[in-house]
Each structure stands twice: as structure tokens, then as C-alpha cells.
Image (tube, rainbow, N blue to C red):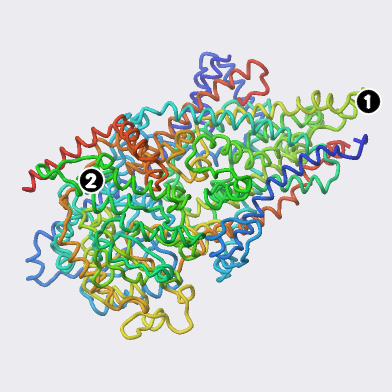
Amino acid sequence: MKRTYRKGLAIALASVLSLSMLLAGCSGSKSNDSTAGSSAGSSASASADSTSPDAASTEPAKALDPYEVVMVYPSGKQTDLDTVQKAMNDYLQQTYPDLNMTVKLNPIDWSAYGDKLNLMMSSGEKFDLLWTANWMNFETQVVKGALLPLDDLLDSYGPDIKAVEGDLLNGARRNGKIYGVHVHQELGNPQGIVVSKELADKYHMDFSVLKSGEFKDFEPFLQTIKDNEPGVTPAVGPAFPLNAYFSSGSMESIIGPVGLDQHDPDPANPYKVVDMYETPRYMELAKLTHDWYRKGFINKDATTPGVDIFKKIQAKTAFASIGSDLEISKDTGIGVPQPMAGKSAQLGIELIQIPMNIDRLHTTKLSATLQAISQTSKDPARAMMLLNLFYKDKNLLTLWNYGVEGKHYVLKDGQIALPDGKTPDNVGYYHDDQWQLGNQMLNYTRVGEDPNKYQNYEQFNELVKSQPSPLFGFVFDPEPVKNELIAVGKVQSTYDAGFQSGQLDPEKELPKMIDKLKAAGLDKIIEEAQKQVDAWRAANGK
Amino acid sequence: MEAVKGAASAVHADQPSRTKKFLRALWKSRALLLLALPGFLLLFVNNYLPMFGIFLAFKDFNYAKGIWGSEWNGLENFKFLFATGDIKFVVLHTLLYNLVFLIVNTTLSVLLALVLHEVKNKWAAKFYQSTLILPNFISMVIVAYLVFGFLNPELGFVNKSILEPLHREGISWYMSPQYWPYILTFVNVWKNVGFGSVIYLATIVGIDKEYYEAAMLDGAGKWKQMTSITLPFLYPVIVILTLLSIGHIFNADFGLFYQVTLDAGNLRSTTEVIDTYVYHALLVSGDTNLASSAGLLQSVVGFALVVAFNAAVRKISRDKALF
Amino acid sequence: MKNDNRTHPLIHLFLIAGCLVCIVPFWLILMVSLTGQKALAKDGYRFWPRDIDPEAYRFLLHDAAPIVRSFGVSILTTAIGTVVSLLVTSALAFALSRKEFPLRGFLNVYVLFTMLFGGGLLPWYLVYTKFLHLQNTLWVLIIPGLLGGFNVFVMRTFFTTSIPPSLVDSAQIDGAGELRTYASITLPLSLPVLATIGLFSTVGYWNDWFRSLVFISDDRLYNLQYFLYNTLMNAQYLQAVADKAHIAAAVSPIQPLEELRMAMAIIAVTPIAIVFPFLQKYFVKGLTIGAVKG
């Protein structure tokens, strides 16, 4: 009795399970099949269009069917979203009637963006343009087939994109194909030191010694504060010399802690891949940081995640932040102190920034904010046409950026200001997501910003472009060593905070960490990276 | 549903009387069938239909190909679990923490329920119970901030207002893994004991007063009453709740281990559990398949354990078992 | 029970100590939510802040309409959800508690299985969107939370151990069918467990934001928790994103983040904390079976 009872139980349960899977299967495969079918169909039509661009322009252009391009991007909810959307559509109808397209804005809350986008893609939901980034699943999306390759579409429908971005588009090239369109913006940042102007003035600090670009030259200033201002922490982290400065200026990062040593490269072999922890520069900076910690220059809660350093400066309990990203101003240069206008206005205190490092042009920066086309799009050509407009049409871009003139903003001397009596919360349409879309150099600036902000960006861009990273164009494929990366990442997480905040003594602990890293497979990663770098060099004649 | 049951009973084809008996019993209890039907359907839609997703653990999911078109990749998605070689420690941690939590929480919850029951003043009882249950309503994110408020190396309550006046060196809490098993257990108890005691209290309240009256007449004191009436009534509930917890013994409260520790890297040697391990791997590789494969393993092992323990309980006293 | 009507003082002491441990953090949360930003950065968390400033509340509540709306959504889904959940759960638990039910064993495993195995987020999402088309409706906020295996088992255990079988038997001898037994005998005697599960249900529905995140894009259907979570996350993400995307300084003013989180916690918890004492009477001594028996 017992045996047959259990058998019956098992069979019944199994039947229920299989029944449910069958049911789910039928509906599931139906919807997924239709998606696969349609995307194949639309990409076929897209390529058909692109193979005969001449034909399209010489014969009377065949009338395009009306199409709604759905734009997905992360942003907060806007009360007047519909108004702005309608304004954009009216504009499109008036100015580009041949394109016969309308736009549907589908902003998704930041907090849900990653998950929701993933669900939309997985369930085959139809949408066209999406914002993505290499720090927001772009790489996974490419590998898992969520995005369409854009080369042909760019050739046929993206002339302005190509004119503006040019070779920079290659930053989003994976396995030979471009999968995202980079937003035209600043190509990097300076990093360095931010200090409170009040305290700097009080002690008549002259920062010209920092033109050396060396952090240790900042020490006397820290000492001054430590000696004279008891309630003020001289330097606050989490970023210290070791972090920002190191990874951009001294080390050309490939993946994790592995990369090319830029500070002390081997003249015979500039492309030798090493791990950063073993470079002499790392030890030097780690010792400096530890020294500063022992002298009491650094805040004790630097290792605690989520600490807001600027709030400390605002509350006058801190003097300097070391290793922060800085703003781009006119004539930015190493060791040149300038007011940090934006952040000062934001916090209500006066800040001075002193760059210690200017970013090189990195491939990773070029995929830090992208627009891509989903493989669920039914008319990718149209999506590309719309995207192209954002690179040439100032009016369209302004609509998306700032809303409807008069209602959501007014122009004062060519700068954007809120209409009288309105605040960002009640004006109906206000966001700071301009960096997600289009050619930013077409943007208006806001009142309070440097009116030449974007010209400054272009100037800075030239500076950045003039020193491209030696690995520019190289993208590492982590697949062969993905398990080692997980293991190495784990070791790093145990020690990094300690070194960066100066709390660990590098002379004792660094060798221990290096041993652990090797045990976790660091050498395998180095080998693989070297292999890929060499292959890339050979293929690209470097 | 009838068809499914019919299929099950068809197995007993060689004993037609048994099938007939079964069907007749079914018909007799058709009212019960009716009562069970909504629940059955709900679980079917909400839980069983999605189960086809278990396949995803064995597939290399591709957005363009969808769930059905994606290729099978066997056990590939499970390999990352063994990547760092310290999976055994991670699993051990998970197990140990859960065992400690189970024992400590159950003991304290029962104790609390017994004690609360002894409070004669209605208003006091109401106040106590409402207060003790409050921590459960706070989300782990806030709890993490509370803990931070106490353990912040610079401004935290412990370092600044307790250790400093005593002229002792402030402890760098988020860099010292050795304290955290205790901290996490304390937080877990604080959050769950009040809430857990509710079930036990509800059971105690349901005990017929006549038992106590009879016991008093027999001269039994408070203690004897508790051990011979209250506790035996509580045993079935304790057993069931324990069995249910065993099913989740390889699952950790992600909020507790990830948010309360602020995901400080240094603490991982004592606080890494399966769920945070998977999450970290996910961050590095960007591959969401990993989560489904780990989850599947956790479920399978948990299920096996519950079945095993349940069988053991059945041997001891049949009606206390889960099934 | 009439012996001594005074509770042992040790018990009071023990319970008061426990309550302090629970209340003190709440007090701290409340205080932090009212602390001005500068004071917070300077002094950290204090039990009595130097500078009281309800800035966070002003920020959250400046626009009352969406919050009131989301409050309404929460109340509606919680109320409907809890009531329906109690009905369905108790019905199933009752069936499972009756030895006469031939499907008992099967259903026990059926329920248990759902507690341990799941297909994952994506298939679940697909069932509700592609299969049932319930996205952006109130139903999708209610249905998934209606039946939890845990609740079923707790109720079932209560039915089998705390309801005297003699009562049930005598009722059935008198001709009551299963439905009648369920409705007039078992349910009335189960007030403690119904209140317990009702509490779990209420808390579950009230605190849920995940279903809103996944299924709701129409902001008129946001519930309170999701609304709050959203406000916080957007502010938080903007700050975090500014770093990652190397955006030179976000122009929007720094939101009072920490105070915001704490204020959110207070707003979210207060309604439940108020409701609970009313459910209390079902847990406190005084409810006897005797009354019903007579």
C-alpha cells in the first residue's frame, strides 16, 4: 500500500508538472517564434534597403509606412511626458514628413532599469532604441544577442552620426560589428584633488608645486590642516592616490588588476601585460597612503562603503578629497587650480580643483553611454533615422533635453532657465539625462553653467584624443578566464579597501595579497590577456 | 484535474477494487475537493506554470533565440560555483548560520511566547507585543543604516559614545570579520523573534483552558503546567516550522548578508554565503544564468533534506510530519 | 485562570528590556529622519539631533497627490489581498487537515514543492504578462501573494492540533457536511491562527514593492512602498551614476539621502504599527473555546 501510494503520488506530481510545462511551452514558443521570425524579417528588409542606397535616392523614394519608434531609457517619471512627446511628434511631422515616424518615449525608473530591460528583452517585447553602457550590461547584451549590429544601418541612415563621431564609433565594436552608438560628449575627465577654498585661502596655500603631478607634493598642505584645524580631517576618501590616479595615469587597465604599466614600462616590451599590484609605482603610492594614514591625515571611515565625502566638506569636517573626478573647464591642465564651478554651486560652498591626471582616450570610455537598437525592433532603419536626427537637429534634441519652450524652460541669453516661479519639481519636465542621447555639443547650457561649457569639452577632447591609450581599440574577451576573474575579484575585495584607505601596511600585506592572487589564478589571466593583446597587435599592425 | 487523478489511479489497474474505492472516496469528499480547488489553481498558475524556467539553468540563454530557441549547455552554468575552490566554505557558512539562526530564533520565540502569555495586564501585553514585533517591519536596507549608525568607525555610536569615553581604541568594524557572526546573529534575532513568537502565541491561546483548570485542581504548579500542557501543544508547530526551515537551509537572507555588511570586501571571510557568492559572480560575469543554476541546486538540496527529515519525523510520531 | 492576577516582576523586566531593544532603533530612525543634512554629516546619528529639520518629509510629501494615491493603492491591495488570501488558504488548509480527504498526501507534496522550487523571475514574469496579460492592473499586485505554502502548513497544523476532533465528529454526526464544518466550526475557532496569517498577509502586501517594479509602469498604480523606493532609488542612482558615467557633476541639488531613507522607513511602517494593536485582541489571553462550545 505504501509503495503504490508513493508511486501514485510521484506520478500525479509529475503529470501536473509536465502539464504545466506543456501549457507554458505552447504559449511561450509561439510568442518567441514570432519574435524571432519578425526580427529576421526586419533585418532582412534593412539589409535589402542598405544594399541599394543609390536605388533609393535615384528612384522616387517609396513611401514609408508610418512607424512608431519606441525609445527606452532610464529616467524618473515626468508629469508632462505626453506633452513633450506630442511636441516632438508634431515637430517630426512638420520638419521630416518623409520619414513618417512618431516617437514613443518610454522612460524606466533608474532603480528598475537593469531588471526591467532584461525582462523586456527576454520576453520579446517590441521596442527600438535603448540606452545602454558597458557598466550596465552592454557586453552581456551583445553576447546574448539582444542588440542588432549597426554597421550597415549607420552607413545608410546615420550620416550625421558618422560625421560627428567618426572613428570613435569603433569603441562599441565587438567581434567586428558595431553594437552601439556613442553619445557625443566629453571623452574623459581630469582627476585630482578638490579642496575647500575657504581653508585654502585661510592658510594662503599655493598649489603651483602640484604641477609636478605628484601626490606627495600635497603633503605639506595636509600637515598644515592637521596641525591647525582639529575638527577637520585633512583628506577624505574613498578615493585616494591609489585609486583614480593609478588606474588612468600609471596603468593601462585591461581587465581587473591586469594591464600595461605606463609609469615604468619596459622599454624593450611596451606591451607587456602585468598585474598592477606588482608594479613599483603601486607599492610607492600604497606606502604614501599608509604613511598619511598613520600621520592622521585620512578619515577612519574611508573603507566603509557609501560614505559621502562631499557632504563632509560641506559640513566643514574635511579639507580635501583626493582622487576625485573633476570638472572640465577652459584650459584644464595638470597642477592648474581652478574653481570647481558646478559642484560649488550644487553644494553651496566654494571648491577648487587641481587636476593631477588627464584621462587618456580609452576604449571603455567610448562605450560608457550608448544608444543601441533592440533585436525586437520591427523597423531598425527607422530607429536609426531617428537616432541620426539627434546628432544634427538642435531643436529635436532640445525638446528631449529640456521640454517645450515657454512651458518647461525659457531662454535667457541663450541659456536655459526655469520659467519664473517654477522649480524642477513642479515644472513638469526636468531631468539631467542629456548625457544619454545625441550630440551633446548641440545642447544649450543652463544658467549658472559656463556658457562655453561644450566648447570647453571640445577643447578637452582634443587634449584627450592627443594621448590615446596604447590599447585603444582593443577589447578583452573575458570568457576563457571568467572563473579566475571571479576568484581574483574576491581576493581584491578583501584587500583593496585596506590599501586604498591606507589602513593596511603594504610592506607586510601586499606580498600576502599577491600570493593569494596567484593562487586564485592571476597568472592565467595575465597569460590570456597577453595572448589577446599580441593577437590584436598582429591583426592591427602595432 | 480529474483526468490527472484518473491517470494516477490507472496505475493500480491490477486492483480494480482499490481504484474504485479511491474514486468513491473522492466522490464522498467532493466538498473538500471544492474547498481545495481555488488553492490548487492558484498555485498552479503562480508556481507550477513558471517552473519550465528550471530549464534555463541548463541553457545558454540568448535573447534573440528566446527561451525555447536557446541552446542547451549542460552543466556549464554550474561550473562557476566551483571556480574559486572555496565553495565548500561558503556552503558551510550558509549551513552553520542557518542552523544557529534556527536554534536561537526558535528557542527565543517560544520563550517569548510563553512569557508574553504570562502577562496578566491586557494593556501591558498589547504594548509589549506590538513593540517587539516592530523590528520585523523595517526593511534590511534601513537595518543596514542603523547598524552603520552604531558601527561607523568615526561617528558611530559604539566607537564615539561607548569606547571613546572608556578611553579605548575605536574598532574598525567593517574591516574586522571576527565580530560579524555575532553581529549578524543579533540582527537576525532582533528582527525575527518578535514576529516568530506570534505563531507560538496564537497556538498557546488556542489551548483549551480546561486543561489548565484540571491541572490546577490536581495541584500542578506553573512549571508543571507549562511542561505538561503548553509545551506538548507547541511541539507540532515547532516541528512543522523547523521542517519548513530545513527546506531553506541552503538559502540565506540576502538582505542580511549583503546589505547589513554593506558588502565590505574584508568581511567576506566570515560572512560570505551562497547567495552573496552567486551575486558577486554575477556582477563579474554579467551572466544572469548563474543565479538560476545556483538557485536550482539550493532547491534540490533543500527538498532532499526536507524529505529526509520528514521521513525521520514520521517514524517518531506520524501526525507531526509535514506529509 | 484565577490564581494570582499579578505578573511576576521579572517577566515585566525581561519584556521591558526586550522592548527597549526594539524601540530604541526606531527612535533613532525617527530622529535621523528629522536631522538636518549638515548636522548629520558632522555628528552622525544622534538620539537627539542638534538641528531638527523635517527636510526629508518636505521633500517626500511636497507633492501630496501621488503619495495619497499610492497610499490608496496599497490599502486597497492589502485589504482585498488579505481577505481573499485568508479564505483561500484556510479552505485549502482545512481540506488538508481532514483525514478523510484522499488527495491529502498528494496536495501536501504539491504545496511543499512550491515552497522549495521555482522557475525563476523570467518565467514567472512571462506567465503574468504573456499568458494572463495582467500587467498594469491591480490583479497582478494581488494574485501572486494570495497563497503561500508556509501559511497553508501553519494553518493546517493549527486545525489538526488545536481544534478538538470531538467537536468536529459530533457536528458531523449531527449531519453537518464538510462545508458546514469548515464555516461554522473550524473557522470561528481559528481566530488566533487567522489573525496570525492575516497579519503575515497584511505585512506581505503592505511591504511589497517588487511586483510593482516588475509589472507596473503606469504611475497611477504605484503602491506606497514602490513610490517611496522609487523616489529614493532615483536620487541614489543619480549620484552613483554621476561617478560611473564620468559625468561632470550632476546639476541637480543633492537630495537629503540618508534622512530620506529614514523618513521613508517611518512613513512606510507607521500604518502597520498602528493596525497591529487592533489585531492584538486575537492573540491576547481571553479567547476561549468554551464560549463557542456552549
Which of the two residues, A87 or A268, is positioned nearer the viewer here? Answer: A268
User: Element at badge 1?
Assistant: helix
Residue C232 vertical position relative to residue A328 in the rendered view, above or below:
above
- Residue type at mark 1? Leu
Chain that bears disc 1:
B
Chain that bears disc 2:
A
Query: Which quarter of the image is occupied by the N terminus of chain C?
Result: top right
Residue found at x 25% / y 66%: A185
Residue found at x 43% / y 61%: A225
Residue found at x 47% / y 62%: A228
Which of the two residues, B93 or A321, is positioned nearer the viewer here? Answer: A321
In the image, which disc is placed on residue B217? 1
In the image: residue B318, left or right of residue C134: right
Which of the two residues, B16 or B111, is positioned nearer the viewer here? Answer: B111
Which of the two residues, B263 or B156, is positioned nearer the viewer here? Answer: B156
Residue A132 vertical position relative to residue A60 in the rendered view, above or below:
above
Residue A52 vertical position relative to residue C145 in the rendered view, above or below:
below
